[in-house]
Image (cartoon, rainbow, N blue to C red):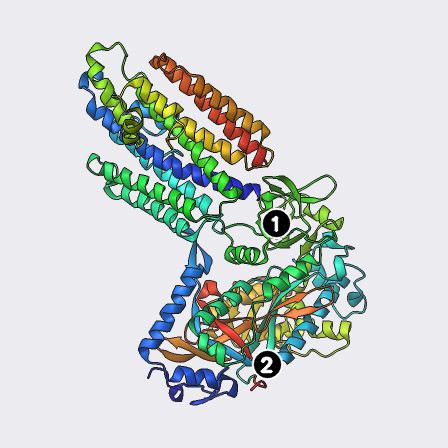
C-alpha cells in the first residue's frame, strides 16, 4: 500500500474521531458549568487551554466568553481543531481515497461535512445554547455512523489497520483531554463547599464518553473519582478507555511490517498507564500524568509517521 | 408514441443512423424499430435507469469553478447509440494504424537523425518553434522505438459522409474510461438490444492497456510494477486515472509517491518501504514531470525521473517529447509524413488545412476568416479557437492580429459541418452534431484500436462543440457486425 494512501486513511479516521470527541468535550464542559455553583467561578477558557490553542484563540478573539469560544471550537476554520475544520479535513482526505473507502461512507462523510457547515452558518444555530445539544449529538451520531460503516463494509486489509490506529490514537488523546477538563485547576480539591458536586461532575465526564451506564454495570459502586479514573484510563474492555485504545493500536501494529520501534513506544505507554496508582493522584499530579500519557501518544504517532509515511 | 422517425429532419446533412426521414440505415434498423414502439413513460424509465446507473457507478468529470473549487459533475450521456457497420470500421481501423505507425516513426526520427528534415519534407523552422519538441529527448531510444503508446485521434464525418482525422492526441489523451462506462450503462439499461444484435465488445481495453504497458518493463519479470501517475484529484480527468488504475490493478500514484535513487531507479513509497517501479503510465504533461529537466517550479513532478528514463530503468508511456507530433501544424503534414515513412497514401484523409506559416496560405486565411475555423497549434479542449462564420467582427480582428504576430502557431480549416445522429431532447429525437475519438495502443508487435471509441455529441442545437467542459455529452458507440445473420 502506498504511504500516501495509508496516511490519508489514518488522518481520515483521526479527523472523524476528532470531530466526534470535540463535540463530546463541549458537551461535558457545558454540563460541568451548568452543574457547578457560581462561586466556583469556572469558565470556558479551560477548554481552549486543554486543546492547546490559547495562542491561536487570542490571535482572533479579544473577548473570552462562551459564545466566542464555542464559535472557535465549532465553526472557526482558522482553528484546525474545530469541528468544522476536522470535518473538512476528513472530507479532503476521503476524496483522495475514494477507491478504498466504500461509496456510502464517502457520501456519509460528505453529508456530515454539509451538516456541520450549514448548521453553523446563518445565525449560528448550532452554537446557540438552545440547539447546541442537538447539533453536537448529530455530529457524534454522524461520526459513529461513519465508523460503523467502515467497520461493516471496508475491506479489512492493512488499510483498515491504519484506519483503526488513527481512530484509536485520536480517541485515547481526547479521552485524556476530557479527563483533563475535570482535573485542570477547575476546583481546588480542598474546596470544602464543593464536595457534593464532585460526584456529579465525574458522572458528567462519564456521560460525555457514553461511559456512565457501562461504568455502573462494571464497577457497581457509586461514582468515585479513583474508580472513574481507573475505568477511563485502565479498563481494557471499554472502547473509549485509554488502555483499550492503546491495545487496539498494538493489535493493528502487529499486522504491519517494520513495527518494532513503534511497538516499543506502545508497550511503554501501556506499562505507564497500568502502573499508575490512580488513588494517589491529586489534581495537579493527575494533570502531569495526563501530560505524560499525551507525550506517549505523540511518540507513537511520530513513530507511525516516520516508519510508514516518511517522505 | 414518442419517437417518430418520419418527422426526423435530416436536411441534407449526413446522419449516422437515418438516411432520410423515416428511413433508417440498415445498420440502425433494429434500434430504430425498438425505439419507435416505446411509450413516453418507457422512455422516461430508461432515462431514469441510465441516470441511476451513472450515479451508482460514480461516473463524473471535474469542472473547475471559481466559487466552489473543483466539483464533480455527473457525466452527460445520451441514450441513443451511434452505430457504425463493422465493414466500414475495418477501413477506419486500418487507417488509424497506418497513421500512428507513421507518427511513431516520425517522432523517433525527430529525436535522432531528422532525416525527414534533411530530405526537406518537413520544415526545420517548424521544429525550432514547436512548443512540444523536447531537446532533452534527443538521442534517446525508448523500447521498440515507440513514443506514442496511447493515441486518441479525433475523427469527424462531414455533411457528405466522408470521414476525416481532425487531430491526433499524443500527449495524455483522455476519454477512454467514458467509452467503457457508456457501454456498461447501455448494457444495464438495454440488455435485450445486446442480446439480439452482434454489437462488438469494447471492454478488453484495460487488459490490452495493461499488457502493452507491462511489455515495456525494463526488468523482464513475471509481474512488473505498473503504475498510473496522476497530477491529483483536482485534475479534470482524475476520475479516469483512478478508473484505469483500478481496472488494471495498478497503483494510482502522485508525484510525491515516487522517488528516484542515486542509481537512477524509480521507487514508490509504500508502508513496506521503497518498492521499485517498472512502468509509468503518466497522465501528467511533460513540462511538469521532472523539475530537474523541465519546469523547475513543478510541485507535481519527480526529480530525476528523466534520468531514470534515459538510463532505461523505467518506461514512460507516452514517452516525454511524444507531443511534438500532437500539434495542429504538424498535423497538416501528416499525409506527407505517411508517404515519407511508409510510402503509402493515407487511408483516412486529413481535413484540408491551411498552414499560416506559408505566406500564400496565410494570405488566404486572413482574407477568408469569416469562412474558416482557426486553431492555435497547441491548445486542447476547444480553447483559443475562432469559429469564423459565427464570430463577431471584433473577434475576427483579434485573430487577424494574433495570426500576423505568430503565424506558425495557427492553422485554419474550412468550417466543417459535422454529421449528426438522433439524440434525445425531452422524449423526442433531434439531430445533434458529433465526433468520435478512438484510442490506439502501440505495442511491440501490434497496434490495437478500440472497437469504436468515445462518441462525443454537442447537446446544444446547432453547436459543433463537443467538449464536456463546454456543454458536450457522449453516446455509446456500436460497431455492429451485419454479416453474422
Q: Residue at x 72, y 47 (%)?
A: B308
Q: Which quadrant holds the C terminus of chain B?
A: bottom right
Give the SS element for disc 1: helix
Q: Residue at x 21, y 39 (%)?
A: A131
- Residue A275, percent from left and from top: 44, 17
- Crowding at label 2, few (<14), some or many (≥20) Cα neighbours within 10 Å? many
- Viewed as shown, does residue A4 lie left or right of B119? left
Mark 1 lies on residue: B288
Nearest the eye: A240 or B389: A240
Q: Residue at x 39, y 66 (%)?
A: B51
* Up/down of B482 relative to A44, above or below: below
Tag 2 or tag 1, which sits nearer the N-term?
2
* Up/down of A1 relative to B315, above or below: above
CA gap, disc 1 and disc 2: 40 Å
Mark 2 lies on residue: B86
Give the SS element for disc 2: helix
Nearest the eye: B479 or B107: B479
- Viewed as shown, does residue A251 lie left or right of B361? left
- Residue A43, percent from left and from top: 26, 22
Amino acid at each position: 500500500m502506498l504511504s500516501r494512501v495509508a496516511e490519508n486513511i489514518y488522518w481520515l479516521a483521526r479527523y472523524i474521531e476528532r470531530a466526534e470527541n470535540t463535540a463530546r468535550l463541549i458537551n461535558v464542559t457545558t454540563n460541568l458549568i451548568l452543574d457547578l455553583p457560581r462561586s466556583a467561578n469556572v469558565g470556558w477558557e479551560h477548554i481552549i487551554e486543554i486543546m492547546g490553542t490559547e495562542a491561536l484563540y487570542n490571535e482572533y478573539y479579544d473577548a473570552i466568553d462562551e459564545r466566542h469560544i464555542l464559535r472557535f471550537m465549532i465553526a472557526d476554520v482558522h482553528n484546525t481543531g474545530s469541528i468544522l475544520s476536522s470535518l473538512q479535513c476528513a472530507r479532503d482526505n476521503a476524496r483522495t481515497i475514494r477507491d478504498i473507502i466504500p461509496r456510502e461512507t464517502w457520501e456519509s462523510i460528505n453529508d456530515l461535512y454539509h451538516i456541520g457547515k450549514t448548521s453553523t452558518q446563518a445565525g449560528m444555530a448550532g452554537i446557540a445554547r438552545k440547539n447546541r445539544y442537538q447539533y453536537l449529538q448529530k455530529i457524534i451520531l454522524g461520526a459513529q455512523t461513519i465508523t460503523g460503516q467502515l467497520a461493516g463494509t471496508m475491506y479489512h486489509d492493512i488499510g483498515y489497520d491504519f484506519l483503526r490506529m488513527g481512530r484509536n490514537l485520536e480517541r485515547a488523546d481526547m479521552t485524556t483531554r476530557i479527563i483533563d477538563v475535570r482535573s485542570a485547576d477547575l476546583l481546588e480539591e480542598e474546596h470544602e463547599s464543593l464536595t457534593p458536586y464532585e460526584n456529579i461532575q465525574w458522572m458528567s465526564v462519564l456521560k460525555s464518553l457514553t461511559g456512565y451506564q457501562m461504568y455502573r454495570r462494571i464497577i457497581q459502586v457509586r461514582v468515585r473519582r479513583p474508580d472513574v479514573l481507573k475505568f477511563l484510563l485502565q479498563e481494557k474492555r471499554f472502547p473509549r478507555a485509554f488502555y483499550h485504545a492503546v491495545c487496539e493500536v498494538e493489535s493493528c501494529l502487529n499486522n504491519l511490517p517494520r513495527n518494532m520501534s513503534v511497538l516499543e513506544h506502545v508497550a511503554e505507554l501501556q506499562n505507564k498507564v497500568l502502573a499508575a496508582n490512580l488513588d494517589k493522584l491529586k489534581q495537579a499530579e493527575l494533570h502531569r500524568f495526563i501530560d505524560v500519557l499525551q507525550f506517549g501518544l505523540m511518540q507513537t504517532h511520530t513513530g507511525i509517521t516516520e516508519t510508514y509515511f516518511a517522505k | 408514441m414518442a419517437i417518430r422517425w418520419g418527422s426526423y429532419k435530416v436536411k441534407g446533412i449526413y446522419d449516422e443512423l437515418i438516411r432520410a426521414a423515416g428511413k433508417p440505415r440498415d445498420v440502425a434498423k433494429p434500434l430504430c424499430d425498438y425505439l419507435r414502439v416505446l411509450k413516453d413513460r418507457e422512455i422516461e424509465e430508461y432515462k431514469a435507469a441510465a441516470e441511476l446507473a451513472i450515479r451508482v457507478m460514480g461516473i463524473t468529470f471535474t469542472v473547475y469553478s471559481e466559487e466552489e473549487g473543483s466539483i464533480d459533475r455527473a457525466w452527460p450521456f445520451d441514450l441513443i447509440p451511434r452505430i457504425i457497420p463493422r465493414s466500414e470500421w475495418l477501413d477506419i481501423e486500418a487507417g488509424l494504424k497506418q497513421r500512428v505507425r507513421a507518427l511513431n516513426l516520425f517522432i523517433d526520427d525527430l529525436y535522432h537523425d531528422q532525416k525527414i528534415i534533411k530530405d526537406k519534407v518537413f520544415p526545420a523552422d517548424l521544429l525550432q518553434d514547436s512548443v512540444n519538441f523536447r531537446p532533452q529527448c534527443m538521442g534517446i531510444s525508448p523500447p521498440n522505438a515507440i513514443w506514442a503508446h496511447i493515441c486518441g485521434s479525433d475523427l469527424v464525418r462531414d455533411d457528405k459522409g466522408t470521414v476525416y482525422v481532425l487531430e491526433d492526441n499524443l500527449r495524455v489523451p483522455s476519454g477512454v474510461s467514458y467509452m467503457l462506462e457508456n457501454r456498461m450503462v447501455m448494457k444495464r439499461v438495454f440488455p435485450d438490444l445486446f442480446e439480439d444484435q452482434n454489437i462488438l465488445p469494447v471492454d478488453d481495453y484495460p487488459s490490452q492497456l495493461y499488457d502493452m504497458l507491462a511489455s515495456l518493463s525494463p526488468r523482464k519479470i513475471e509481474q512488473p510494477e505498473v503504475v498510473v501517475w496522476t497530477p491529483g484529484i483536482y485534475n479534470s480527468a482524475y476520475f479516469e486515472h483512478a478508473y484505469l488504475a483500478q481496472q488494471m490493478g495498478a497503483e494510482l500514484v502522485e508525484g510525491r509517491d515516487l522517488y528516484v535513487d542515486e542509481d537512477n531507479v524509480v521507487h514508490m513509497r509504500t508502508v513496506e518501504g521503497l518498492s521499485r517501479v517498472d512502468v509509468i503510465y503518466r497522465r501528467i504533461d511533460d513540462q511538469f514531470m521532472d523539475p530537474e529537466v523541465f519546469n523547475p517550479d513543478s510541485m507535481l513532478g519527480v526529480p530525476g525521473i528523466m534520468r531514470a528514463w534515459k538510463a532505461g530503468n523505467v518506461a514512460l508511456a507516452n514517452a516525454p517529447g511524444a507531443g511534438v507530433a500532437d500539434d495542429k501544424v504538424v498535423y497538416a503534414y501528416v499525409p506527407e509524413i505517411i508517404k515519407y515513412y511508409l510510402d503509402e497514401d493515407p487511408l483516412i484523409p486529413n481535413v484540408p488545412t491551411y498552414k499560416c506559416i506559408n505566406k500564400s496560405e496565410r494570405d488566404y486565411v486572413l482574407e477568408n476568416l469569416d469562412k474558416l475555423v482557426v486553431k492555435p497549434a497547441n491548445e486542447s479542449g476547444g480553447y483559443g479557437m475562432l469559429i469564423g462564420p459565427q464570430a463577431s467582427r471584433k473577434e475576427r480582428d483579434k485573430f487577424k492580429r494574433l495570426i500576423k504576430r505568430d503565424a506558425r502557431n495557427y492553422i485554419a480549416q474550412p468550417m466543417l459541418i459535422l454529421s449528426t445522429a438522433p439524440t434525445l431532447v425531452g422524449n423526442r429525437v433531434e439531430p445533434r452534431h458529433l465526433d468520435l475519438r478512438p484510442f490506439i495502443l502501440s505495442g511491440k508487435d501490434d497496434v490495437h484500436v478500440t472497437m469504436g471509441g468515445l462518441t462525443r455529441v454537442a447537446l446544444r442545437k446547432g453547436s459543433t462543440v463537443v467538449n464536456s467542459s463546454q456543454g458536450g455529452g457522449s453516446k455509446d458507440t456500436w460497431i455492429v457486425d451485419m454479416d453474422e445473420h
